């Protein structure tokens, strides 16, 4: 089977999307394809040829979605400027958006060229693959297809199309767009999203409060997962916040090595708005903007804004509960009530800037790493304290990755592809990240953090 499309988004008001045509690509070539994802989607790889993956052979007319968003705090009307949804694929009772990224200009492109570089699409492929295997809810990447374009960014390199799969690409910013530009459609749109993602919410006068509640919960779970593995999303604009709590838009993202809550990798995030440790307050800020977008519903339905505010007031306690439960697990503590010990441990991390990933592996199995930060009396004392209540190996192994995509290894693998056309380093990274919680023989290489100065200088970019 190839795609089995049933695109319900086109039944919504035409203000919400535009019909578009992917750019034509003379010689598309598959660089990588995710056969496991093909199987999960019930797709027959023999029939899914490059023409179909590149949007050249189409089953129906693709669409670009309109949306808005707060970008670095400022409200902007946007839309898919270089992305197109080929259709909604239905398999085994689940619905998936099949989206092309880098497939050319749309009515929302502005001055953008609609293109993407092959290195940034390979990067997104790798990060989404890693996040999925780290058990974090995420968009997935079906394939990267190289095009004949020469795309001009920091360097000129081949263009590419990424085939991205999500439960949907609906975001907080889609609600902001509807509230601003098609307010009469807001209730119908919200009902559509509830039917699509949260059909269990019964249609009663509490539905919209419950909807806000589940969106907030899934977002808290997502960000707590990021904090668990040291992920810095890098561009938490409200248009990059999925309504279903899927991590997506792997642009300037990266994994922190040395623990520092101020870690920022994105070239344009000069004030640290989206720093590692700011992801929690920014999530709350984004949820406030989402609540505002739902505000017009308050006069049309039984919902009152006070009810949404009351939900927002629960944010800090709910985030804390989720966060401390996660951190206690990382420390192998099976019971509740050890928040103080978690705080003490975080203080040590802040003070020493130890490698975040390896610290938990070292706690689990002392002398794994040859790093002086782990041989201090203070670390030993902390470990003894933890041993009294935690360090349960089984718990720790479930949540502490042995491997993360180390930034310098990601860059080396992309450079190798650009310089030689070889994917050997990229594929070895994928192999390691297929099972990031399982130790492998090659561990020393892939567990090695970069030199200490690296994180301060490492830079990632938007829109590449
Ligand atoms: P982002 O910050 O990556 O989520 O992108 C913000 C907006 O810019 C989105 O609406 C994108 O579709 C758009 N955009 C990014 N790069 C390009 C490009 N090369 N051409 C057209 N639109 C783009
Ligand atoms: Mg985006």
Image: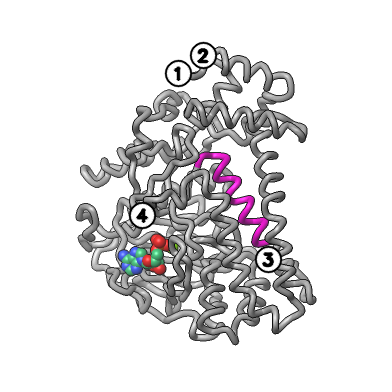
For the residue pair 150 and 312, the one nearer the viewer reads as 312
Q: Are marks 2 and 1 in contact (CB under 8 Å)?
A: yes
Residue 235 image point, x, y percent: 44, 55
Which mark's residue is nearer the viewer, 4 or 3?
A: 3
Residue holding disc 4: 121
Residue holding disc 3: 212
Distance between the alpha carbons at the discs numbered 2 and 3: 47 Å
Distance between the alpha carbons at the discs numbered 2 and 4: 41 Å
Q: Are marks 4 and 3 in contact (CB under 8 Å)?
A: no
Q: Secondary structure at mark 4?
A: helix
Q: Which of the two discs, 3 and 1, labels the residue nearer the N terminus?
A: 3
Residue 201 image point, x, y percent: 75, 68
Residue holding disc 1: 371
Which mark's residue is nearer the viewer, 1 or 4?
A: 1
Q: Which of the two discs, 2 and 3, labels the residue nearer the N terminus?
A: 3
Asked if 149 appears above or below 402 in the picture, the reply is below
Asked if 223 appears above or below 363 in the picture, the reply is below
Residue 74 image point, x, y percent: 44, 67
Q: What range of the chain is rendered magenta? A: 214-230
Is ligand 2 within 8 Å of the beta carbon of the residue shown at mark 3? Answer: no
């Amino acid at each position: 089977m190839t795609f089995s499309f049933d695109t319900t988004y086109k039944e919504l008001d035409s203000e919400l999307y535009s019909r578009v045509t992917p750019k034509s690509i003379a010689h598309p070539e598959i660089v990588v394809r995710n056969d496991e994802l093909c199987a999960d989607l019930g797709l027959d790889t023999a029939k899914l040829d490059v023409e179909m993956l590149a949007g050249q052979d189409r089953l129906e007319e693709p669409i670009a979605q309109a949306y808005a968003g707060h970008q670095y705090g400022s409200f902007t009307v946007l839309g898919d400027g270089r992305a197109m949804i080929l259709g909604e694929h239905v398999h085994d009772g689940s619905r998936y958006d099949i989206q092309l990224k880098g497939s050319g200009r749309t009515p929302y492109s502005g001055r953008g060229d609609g293109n993407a570089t092959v290195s940034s699409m390979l990067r997104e492929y790798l990060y989404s693959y890693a996040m999925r295997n780290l058990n974090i809810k995420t968009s997935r990447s079906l394939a990267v297809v190289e095009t004949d374009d020469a795309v001009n960014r920091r360097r000129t390199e081949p263009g590419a199309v990424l085939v991205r799969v999500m439960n949907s690409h609906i975001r907080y910013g889609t609600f902001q767009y509807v509230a601003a530009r098609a307010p009469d459609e807001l209730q119908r749109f919200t009902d559509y999203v509830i039917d699509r993602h949260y059909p269990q919410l019964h249609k009663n006068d509490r539905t919209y409060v419950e909807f806000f509640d589940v969106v907030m919960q899934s977002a808290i779970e997502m960000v707590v997962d990021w904090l668990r593995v040291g992920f810095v999303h890098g561009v938490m604009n409200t248009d990059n916040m999925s309504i279903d709590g899927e991590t997506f838009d792997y642009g300037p993202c990266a994994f922190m090595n040395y623990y520092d809550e101020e870690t920022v990798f994105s070239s344009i995030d000069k004030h640290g708005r989206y720093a590692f440790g700011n992801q929690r307050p920014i999530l709350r800020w984004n949820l406030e903007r989402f609540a505002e977008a739902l505000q017009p519903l308050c006069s049309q339905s039984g919902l009152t804004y006070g009810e949404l505010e009351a939900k927002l007031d629960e944010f800090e306690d709910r985030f804390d509960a989720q966060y401390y439960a996660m951190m206690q697990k990382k420390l192998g503590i099976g019971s509740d009530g050890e928040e103080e010990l978690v705080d003490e441990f975080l203080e040590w991390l802040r003070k020493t800037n130890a490698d975040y990933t390896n610290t938990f592996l070292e706690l689990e199995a002392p002398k794994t790493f040859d790093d002086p930060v782990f041989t201090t009396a203070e670390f030993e004392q902390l470990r003894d304290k933890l041993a009294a209540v935690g360090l349960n190996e089984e718990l720790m192994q479930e949540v502490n990755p042995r491997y993360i995509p180390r930034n310098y290894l990601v860059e080396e693998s992309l450079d190798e592809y650009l310089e030689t056309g070889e994917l050997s380093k990229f594929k070895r990274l994928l192999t390691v990240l297929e099972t990031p919680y399982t130790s492998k023989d090659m561990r020393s290489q892939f567990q090695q953090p970069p030199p200490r100065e690296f994180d301060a200088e490492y830079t990632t970019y938007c829109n590449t």
